[in-house]
Image: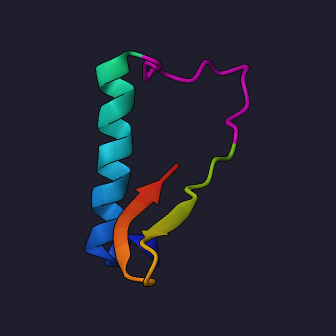
Amino acid sequence: MALNEQSRVDAMHEELNQFQKLKVWQLVELPKWNKLLDTRWVFRNKQDDSGVIVRNKAR
């Protein structure tokens, strides 16, 4: 699971901090008449030419 790996948790925090910094979203309470949309985290490992993981990314 993603929350068990610290590198993925750090990548999620980095992505959420960018959202907050750029002011692209705002957390609000869900109205009773609306449905919640499911979302998923997508993780990628950025590698250099020799295959060594340089950075973990989350979206």
Depicted 6 relative to depicted 23: above or below: below
The location of residue 19, given as percent across then percent down, is: 39, 28
Magenta span contains residue 34: yes
The residue at the far front in this view is: 49
| Nearer the observer, 56 or 47 | 47
Q: Is residue 13 left or right of residue 37?
A: left
Protein image colouring: rainbow
| Highlighted range, magenta | 24-37
Q: Is residue 33 left or right of residue 18?
A: right
Depicted 29 relative to depicted 5: above or below: above
Depicted 57 relative to depicted 5: above or below: above
Magenta span contains residue 35: yes
Tally of numbered tags = 0
The image quadrant that residue 4 belongs to is bottom left
The location of residue 2, given as percent across then percent down, is: 44, 72
Q: Is residue 5 left or right of residue 35?
A: left
The image quadrant that residue 16 belongs to is top left
Depicted 51 relative to depicted 57: above or below: below
Q: Is residue 20 left or right of residue 50?
A: left
**Image point (65%, 21%), residue name:** 32
Q: Main secondary structure of the magenta part?
A: loop
**Image point (35%, 64%), residue name:** 55
**Image point (57%, 24%), residue name:** 30
**Image point (55%, 56%), residue name:** 41
The location of residue 9, given as percent across then percent down, is: 32, 62
The location of residue 10, given as percent across then percent down, is: 27, 59
